Image (tube, rainbow, N blue to C red):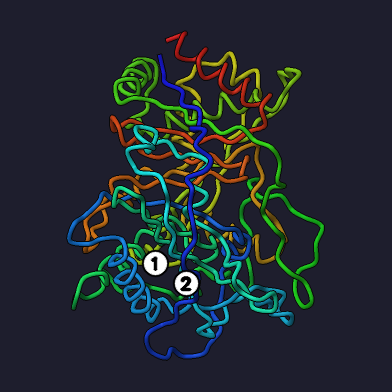
C-alpha cells in the first residue's frame, strides 16, 4: 500500500536569530530597470526552500556563514537584479525590477535541536522548516523596502546546518533557481569561476508587436481589470487559512507497477513518472473540493511546463528568469472517477505536447492584452528534474533539499523522495478536503 506521511509536528526547531542584515554586490553594478515578461508579472509571491548539510569538521557553521556571505556578494554582481527592488512603471502598468543595489537579505541563526533529533522525519518537509527560511527582515525599518530574496544559515547543535532560501518567484523559476544555486555554490570555493554565465535578458519572452492570440487559453482566468497606463498586474495568491499538510509517497516499485499496468492498456509510447503522479493527484483533488459529488462538474488540472526547449530557437539553458507556463487538462468528475486511469495519464502526456512554439507566443500575447491569472482546480509543479541536492558547495553536497510548506493550497509540489528514490507529493488543504483527498489516494492503491 502507498505510504502517507503527515507533516511531522515538530513546529518549533528552537531557532534563535543571531544576525540579520543586507548583503550587497561586492562591486558597483549599473543602475537600470529590468523588463519583466508577462509570466513574470503574475508570479509575485515567495518560494521558500531548505537545504540540509551534515557536520563538516573543515567547515564549522560559523565558517560556512562567512564563506556563504562572500559567495553571495560575488554572485550578486552577475545577478544584480536579485539585489534590486520591485517597482511599478505607472506609464506602462507593468512591474519592473529596479537594479538599485539595495541588497539581498542575510540571516544567521542557531537551532537548539540536532539533525538526529529531527531523525528520519528530516526528509518530510515539516512546519518547523518555516523557521529556516524567513521571508522578510524584521530588522528593517518600515520605510525600507524588503529584499526580493533572503538567505539564512541555521546551525544545529550537532554541527550540521541548513541553508534556507526565500526568493520571490518573479526572480526565476525552478530551473533558473538551479542555475543560480550552482553559481552561488561555485563562489563558495576560492578562485573558482561561475558554473555558467546567466542569461538575464527577459525581453526574449516579450509579447509580439502587434500581439497575435491564436489559441483560446482557458488556462488563464480573464479578470475585469484595466491594461496599460495607470494599471497594475493582478495578484496570483491564496488567502491565509488553517490547512493540513501531508506528504503522499509513491515508491519506485509502486510507480513501476502502475506503469506496467498502463502499458498493457494504453498505447502511450513513453510513460513518464510525472504524468503518472500528476494523474493520480488530479483524481484525488477532483473530489476533495466537492463535498457533494457532481458527476457533471468539470475538473481542471494545471501542469506547469518548462518552455525552454519548446520555443524556436530554444531558450539558453542558463536562462535566469521564468520560462514556465501552465497548461490545463479537463475532464468531468464522472470521467475521472469511472474512466480508466491510463486515460488520465494519456491526457496528461498528450496535453503537454500542445505547448508548442506558437502556443507559447500566443500565451504571452494573450497576457499582453488581458489581465489574467492561472485558472484551474489545482496546479502541479515538478521538482523531479531540479537536482538541488546534487549541487557541490565547498563544504559538500546537501544531504537533503526540499520545498518549505506554505499557504499555497492551490499548488502541489512533486519531488524525489530522499529515502528510496520514489516520488513524494506535498499537499496542503483544509482538513475536510484533505480527508477526501487521502481516501481517494488509498482507494486507488487498493484497486490495483
Depth order, front residue of 426/222: 426
Q: Position of residue 376 (x, y in %)?
A: 65, 40
Q: Position of residue 420 (x, y in %)?
A: 28, 29
Specify few, some or many for label 2: CA neighbours under 10 Å numbering under 14, 14-19, or 20 or more: few
Residue appearing at x 55%, y 72% in the figure: 147
Q: Are marks 1 and 2 in contact (CB under 8 Å)?
A: yes
| Residue 145 image label | none
Depth order, front residue of 40/71: 71
Residue appearing at x 72%, y 60% in the figure: 234
User: Which residue is identified by label 2?
Assistant: 204
Check disc 1 and report its element: helix, strand or loop.
loop
How far is the residue under mark 1 from the one under mark 2? 10 Å
- Mark nearer the viewer, 1 or 2: 1
Q: State left or right for residue 168 relative to residue 187.
A: right
Position of the N terminus, as image quadrant, is top left
Q: Position of residue 410 (x, y in %)?
A: 62, 41
Residue appearing at x 42%, y 91% in the figure: 28
Depth order, front residue of 351/421: 421
* Relative vertical location of residue 408 with respect to residue 289 in this rendering, above or below: below
User: Tag 2 or tag 1, which sits nearer the N-term?
Assistant: 2
Residue 56 appears in which quarter of the rendering?
A: bottom left
Residue appearing at x 49%, y 41% in the figure: 413
* Relative vertical location of residue 73 with respect to residue 302 in this rendering, above or below: below
Q: Position of residue 118 (x, y in %)?
A: 39, 37
Depth order, front residue of 140/104: 140
Check disc 2 and report its element: helix, strand or loop.
helix
| Residue 319 image label | 1
Specify few, some or many for label 1: CA neighbours under 10 Å numbering under 14, 14-19, or 20 or more: many
Amino acid at each position: 500500500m502507498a505510504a502517507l506521511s503527515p507533516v511531522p509536528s515538530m513546529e518549533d526547531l528552537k531557532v534563535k536569530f543571531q544576525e540579520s542584515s543586507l548583503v550587497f554586490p561586492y562591486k558597483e553594478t549599473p543602475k537600470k530597470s529590468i523588463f519583466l515578461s508577462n509570466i513574470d508579472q503574475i508570479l509575485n509571491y515567495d518560494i521558500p526552500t531548505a537545504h540540509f548539510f551534515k557536520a563538516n569538521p573543515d567547515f564549522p557553521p560559523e565558517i560556512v556563514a562567512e564563506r556563504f556571505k562572500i559567495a553571495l556578494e560575488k554572485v550578486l554582481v552577475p545577478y544584480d537584479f536579485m539585489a534590486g527592488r520591485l517597482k511599478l512603471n505607472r506609464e506602462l502598468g507593468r512591474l519592473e525590477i529596479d537594479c538599485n543595489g539595495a541588497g539581498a537579505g542575510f540571516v544567521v541563526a542557531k537551532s537548539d535541536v540536532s539533525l538526529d533529533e529531527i531523525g528520519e522525519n528530516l526528509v518530510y518537509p515539516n512546519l518547523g522548516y518555516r523557521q529556516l527560511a524567513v521571508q522578510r527582515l524584521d530588522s528593517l525599518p518600515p520605510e525600507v523596502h524588503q529584499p526580493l530574496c533572503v538567505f539564512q544559515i541555521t546551525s544545529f547543535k550537532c554541527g550540521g546546518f541548513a541553508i534556507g532560501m526565500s526568493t520571490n518567484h518573479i526572480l526565476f523559476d525552478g530551473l533558473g533557481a538551479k542555475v543560480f544555486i550552482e553559481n552561488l555554490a561555485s563562489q563558495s570555493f576560492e578562485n573558482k569561476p561561475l558554473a555558467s554565465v546567466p542569461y538575464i535578458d527577459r525581453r526574449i519572452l516579450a509579447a509580439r508587436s502587434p500581439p497575435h492570440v491564436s489559441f483560446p487559453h482557458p488556462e488563464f482566468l480573464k479578470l475585469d481589470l484595466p491594461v496599460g497606463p495607470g494599471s497594475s498586474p493582478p495578484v496570483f495568491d491564496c488567502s491565509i487559512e488553517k490547512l493540513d499538510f501531508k506528504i503522499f509517497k509513491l515508491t519506485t516499485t509502486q510507480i513501476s507497477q502502475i506503469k506496467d499496468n498502463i502499458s498493457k492498456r494504453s498505447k502511450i509510447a513513453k510513460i513518464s513518472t510525472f504524468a503518472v503522479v500528476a494523474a493520480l493527484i488530479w483524481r484525488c483533488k477532483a473530489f476533495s473540493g466537492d463535498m457533494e459529488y457532481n458527476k457533471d462538474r468539470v475538473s481542471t488540472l494545471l501542469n506547469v511546463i518548462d518552455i525552454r526547449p519548446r520555443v524556436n530557437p530554444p531558450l539558453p539553458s542558463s536562462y535566469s528568469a521564468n520560462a514556465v507556463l501552465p497548461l490545463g487538462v479537463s475532464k468531468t468528475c464522472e470521467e475521472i472517477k469511472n474512466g480508466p486511469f491510463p486515460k488520465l495519464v494519456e491526457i496528461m502526456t498528450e496535453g503537454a505536447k500542445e505547448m508548442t512554439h506558437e502556443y507559447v507566443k500566443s500565451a504571452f500575447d494573450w497576457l499582453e492584452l488581458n489581465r489574467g491569472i492561472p485558472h484551474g482546480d489545482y496546479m502541479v509543479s515538478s521538482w523531479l528534474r531540479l537536482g538541488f541536492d546534487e549541487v557541490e558547495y565547498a563544504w559538500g553536497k546537501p544531504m537533503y533539499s526540499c520545498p518549505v510548506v506554505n499557504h499555497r493550497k492551490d499548488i502541489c509540489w512533486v519531488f524525489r523522495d530522499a529515502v528510496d528514490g520514489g516520488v513524494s507529493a506535498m499537499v496542503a488543504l483544509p482538513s475536510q478536503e484533505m480527508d477526501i483527498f487521502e481516501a481517494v489516494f488509498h482507494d486507488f492503491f487498493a484497486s490495483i
